[in-house]
Image: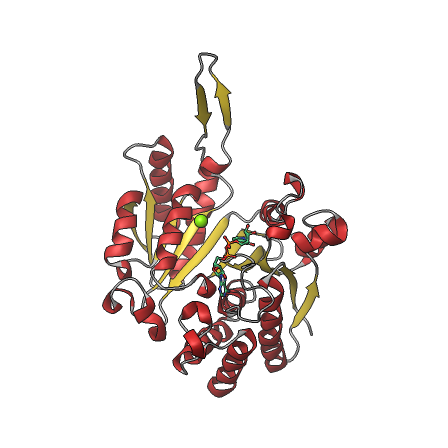
Amino acid sequence: MATHKILLLPGDGIGTEIAAAARKVIAWFDSRAGGVFEIEEDVVGGAAYDAHGVAITDAAMDLAQASDAVLFGAVGGPKWASVPYEVRPEAGLLRLRKDLGLFANLRPAICYPALADASSLKREVVEGLDILIVRELTGGVYFGEPKEIRDLGNGQKRGIDTQVYDTYEIERIARVAFDLARTRSNKVSSSEKHNVMKSGVLWKEVVTAVHAREYGDVALDHILADNCGMQLVRWPKQFDVIVCDNLFGDMLSDVAAMLTGSLGMLPSAALGATDPATGKRKAMYEPVHGSAPDIAGTGAANPIAMIASFAMALRYSFGMVDEANLLDKAIAAALDTGARTRDIGGGDNSVGTEAMTATILAALDRLS
Ligand code: NAI
Ligand code: MG
């Protein structure tokens, strides 16, 4: 019986190519588990604009609302460079995040042993690295009001952005971080700048209170965001889960990501609140990279970021933790065979999207 509804939104460029790879991996787990997945597919981004004149249709949004997880490829490309702002491809992504209430962005930084030498840092600094950045995604300075460029009338203008966080927003992201830490190494580092920001003072206060009330079993420390950036580069293995606001999270997650290699390797999740009635939460999983117009259509795209995003869906939406671990192991094993797409240093011996996917499927067969 199909119990897990997936909405697959391939999008544009390499989005369609990595979505095809994801379908094969989903099919592998589906046949193993006896048909638990139901996949709907729709267009988003430029593809939706071409077909319907919008970046995502209401019908696709209904499918997203009814799904247990959205698996999103990538959107955008030069073809849509001059479409109106409200219907630009990225608007599809933003509407999904907003309408599904996806306030928690999860960005793992995992160093696969086979790629440790590809990092810009020394092997011993990154080998075995497995950290998770939990970024608040729907609040903070990107959304706070007032947000404007004000004409001061004296030949000067003033650019204004406002960092705003309410208690409930900090509480819910803190709970996501603490809950995740319990499934990992049981340690949360909360990062803000309470030394110079009022929102940072509140952030630290609320995280401390949630910890004291509900998560005494989890280790918590506080680290100023600038120091956190330094420590990520100096000795990243000191961290397990890092929780931070939208702005610091944007930067820290990109820093952490690059410890471990290429954009083509990096998955992400965006989670909403758990519905108390069903125990389910809205969720979207997507690679960090974009539609890579420079290689779209060549079959060269690395499918790992997308496949690892599905592994996160297994872990965080479907309660299939053993399967998620198996898939993560299969990705590592595929890399151990020496298979490399061009973006991770395959050079003249590079394999394409299909061959890399086949190598991962073979590893799944072998390891299961
Ligand atoms: P990009 O991530 O698409 O590509 C940057 C570079 O990384 C390119 O050289 C590309 O070939 C390479 N790359 C990315 N993913 C790869 C993969 N899986 N395998 C192999 N190589 C890979 O970022 P770019 O070029 O800045 O943006 C291209 C388009 O994608 C733009 O329209 C942008 O707005 C959009 N975009 C969409 C995102 C999304 O849908 N979430 C995120 C980022 C950008
Ligand atoms: Mg960023």
Write the residue at 51% across / 64% down: 309
Q: Residue at 68% of width from left, 71% of height from top?
A: 2
- Report the quarter where the N terminus lies: bottom right
Task: Please state which of residues 3 and 210 is positioned toward the viewer in this rendering.
Answer: 3
Residue 170, quarter of picture: top left
- Residue found 43% across the figure and 17% down from its top: 156
Where residue 191 sits in the image (x, y, percent)?
33, 45
Residue shown at 38% from the left, 47% from the top: 251
Residue 301 versus residue 282 in the image, above or below: below
Residue 134 visible, this orientation: yes
What is the residue that sits farthest to the front in this orientation?
348
Q: Is residue 140 above or below residue 50?
A: above
Spot occupied by residue 213 in the image (x, y as percentages of width and height):
37, 47
Picture coordinates of residue 363, whole percent (x, y): 48, 83
In the rendering, at what x and y percent does residue 95 appear? 62, 46
Answer with left or right where residue 2 lies relative to residue 207.
right
